[in-house]
């Protein structure tokens, strides 16, 4: 039976990692100890900008063969662009030159894992741990590798070490969810659900994510607490959250080709790193000056920096280049509305769905704009039936395609109530209150729906359920008080 590295005593693990280091950095007798960098011709799958970047980096290495950073960067170029075997070799060479580089060991491990050589990857990451023992990602990442390989008993000590690092720091780390989710999954796999429940309940105080809710529901069922699991229903795809790891950013930044560059730019924009996003967009535009996806990212940069005029100019350029690009029309609609031009915003939202009838965000935008132009957001008044029905038409289209945002469900449910479509409102709001991220107003509106349909028992039950979950919420208290007065002063229990 295979003896796992992580089932061995710490002293032996360190000895093995040192042995791996010695083997990896040993010189070949009778020749140059550092072989030439791997050629992109060996991959057979790289082309275009990727090949250009790799060949350029190889030229840098040829000028300075002993430059470990140059070989590490070549490894990242290969790794980011789908050539894991060449990445592993480039990073092995970087380690031969500088065997103390924690990052080179880390990237080497990641490359080896992508080649399905898990045990060698574990040896490399053990070397990284030796040089930087307080970096939690060096423990929870291989923990997930082992979990996916069905080796939960070996993974658990790694997640526990990541937890110990956080404990020594004295405060939750940005990647705090990683070791908690990892430990809980290990414990569930090892048939220790009681311990998993404790970890996942703590995680609920740190993270609002459907995957964590799903795991907690599973754990509750495993310990016989099915009634507590019932209200916890995960929504959307059951993908785990992303865990912050700054050392992965150089891999993302090394991606070449339009898709990889767009992904990196999106990361920079999402994290509001506008000073870095600007040069990244400019560099990509040198190769693709009229690409509408890049122009939309440039508009996003202008939005983040508060330059609304430049944002609108850029999006108008995008729709001139490609009049059938739905995203450009949608983003221009958003920008025009924020500048106060509701009619032109509505025009471009319609152009977006004309370009792509399956583009849900644009249908939602049309609905929102009709709500605003019909003044439906200012309360219920007489003679609004036509305006309500007009706003519902695009929203019906959006929800037929699929909408996840709970705020949109709340708005839709409220409009359905105002249109007298009580069955549809009950269906939409009934699903909404099952979600962990539902707004307490969902219970208030659903209670009103039941009351409008004459089902006062369901109306009362709904508002009580809402108050149990959100004690003291003003809308729910107001409705409960109305029921109290209607019942002759007897408050609902």
Image: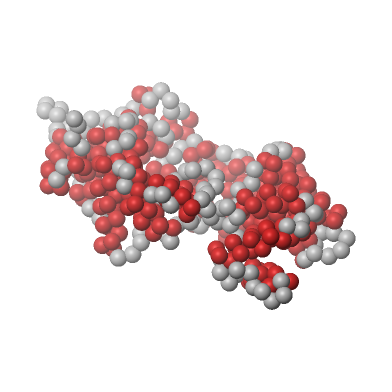
Residue 469's place in the image compared with 129, above or below, is below
Between 425 and 106, the residue placed more toward the observer is 425
Residue 17's place in the image compared with 213, above or below, is above
Residue that appears at 21% across and 50% down:
131
Between 340 and 124, the residue placed more toward the observer is 124
Residue 478's place in the image compared with 450, above or below, is below
Residue that appears at 52% across and 42% down:
237
Residue 420's place in the image compared with 53, above or below, is below
Residue that appears at 32% across and 31% down:
116
Between 440 and 164, the residue placed more toward the observer is 440
The image shows residue 190 at horizontal and vertical percentages of: 30, 42
Residue that appears at 12% across and 47% down:
11
**Residue 48 visible, this orientation:** yes
The extreme right residue here reads 383
**Residue 372 visible, this orientation:** no
Locate the N terminus and report the quarter of the image it occupies: top left
Left or right of 5 on screen, residue 469: right
The extreme bottom residue here reads 489
Left or right of 187 on screen, residue 267: right
Between 237 and 137, the residue placed more toward the observer is 237
Tell me how the rendering is colored.
secondary structure
The image shows residue 483 at horizontal and vertical percentages of: 70, 69
Left or right of 345 on screen, residue 133: left
Which quadrant would residue 287 be assigned to in this image?
A: top right
Give the total number of marks visible in the rendering: 0
The image shows residue 87 at horizontal and vertical percentages of: 33, 34
The image shows residue 417 at horizontal and vertical percentages of: 75, 56
Locate the C terminus and report the quarter of the image it occupies: bottom right
Left or right of 374 on screen, residue 400: left
């Amino acid at each position: 039976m295979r003896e796992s590295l992580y089932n061995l005593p710490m002293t032996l693990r360190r000895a093995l990692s040192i042995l791996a280091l010695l083997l990896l950095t040993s010189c070949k007798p009778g020749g140059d100890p550092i072989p030439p960098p791997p050629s992109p011709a060996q991959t057979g799958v790289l082309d275009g900008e990727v090949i250009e970047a790799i060949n350029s980096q190889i030229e840098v290495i040829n000028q300075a063969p002993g430059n470990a950073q140059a070989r590490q960067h070549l490894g990242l170029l290969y790794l980011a662009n789908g050539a894991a075997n060449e990445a592993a070799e480039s990073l092995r060479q970087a380690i031969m030159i500088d065997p103390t580089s924690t990052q080179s060991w880390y990237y080497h491990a990641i490359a080896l894992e992508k080649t399905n050589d898990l045990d060698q990857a574990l040896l490399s990451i053990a070397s990284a741990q030796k040089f930087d023992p307080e970096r939690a990602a060096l423990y929870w990442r291989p923990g997930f590798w082992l979990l996916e390989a069905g080796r939960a008993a070996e993974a658990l000590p790694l997640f526990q070490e990541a937890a110990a690092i956080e404990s020594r720091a004295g405060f939750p780390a940005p990647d705090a969810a990683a070791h908690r989710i990892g430990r809980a999954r290990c414990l569930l796999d090892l048939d220790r659900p009681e311990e998993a429940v404790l970890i996942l309940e703590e995680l609920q105080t740190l993270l609002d994510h459907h995957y964590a809710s799903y795991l907690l529901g599973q754990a509750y069922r495993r310990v016989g607490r099915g009634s507590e699991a019932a209200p916890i229903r995960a929504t959307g795809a059951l993908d785990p959250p992303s865990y912050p790891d700054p050392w992965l950013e150089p891999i993302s930044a090394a991606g070449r080709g339009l898709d990889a560059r767009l992904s990196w730019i999106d990361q920079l924009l999402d994290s509001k790193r506008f000073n870095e996003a600007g040069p990244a967009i400019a560099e990509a535009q040198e190769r693709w000056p009229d690409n509408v996806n890049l122009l939309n990212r440039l508009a996003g940069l202008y939005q983040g920096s508060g330059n609304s005029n430049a944002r609108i100019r850029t999006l108008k350029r995008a729709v001139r280049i490609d009049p059938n690009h739905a995203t450009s029309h949608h983003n221009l609609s958003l920008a025009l509305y924020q500048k106060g031009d509701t009619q032109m915003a509505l025009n471009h939202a319609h152009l977006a769905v004309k370009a792509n009838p399956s583009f849900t965000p644009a249908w939602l935008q049309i609905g929102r704009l009709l709500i605003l132009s019909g003044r439906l957001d200012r309360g219920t008044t007489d003679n609004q039936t036509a305006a309500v029905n007009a706003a519902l038409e695009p929203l019906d289209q959006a929800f037929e395609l699929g909408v996840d945002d709970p705020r949109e469900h709340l708005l839709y449910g409220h409009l359905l109530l105002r249109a007298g479509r009580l069955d549809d409102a009950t269906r939409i709001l009934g699903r909404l209150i099952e979600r962990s991220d539902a707004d307490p107003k969902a219970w208030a509106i659903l209670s009103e729906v039941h009351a409008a349909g004459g089902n006062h028992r369901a109306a009362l039950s709904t508002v009580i359920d809402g108050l149990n979950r959100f004690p003291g919420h003003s809308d729910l208290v107001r409705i409960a008080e109305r029921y109290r007065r209607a019942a002759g002063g007897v408050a609902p229990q």
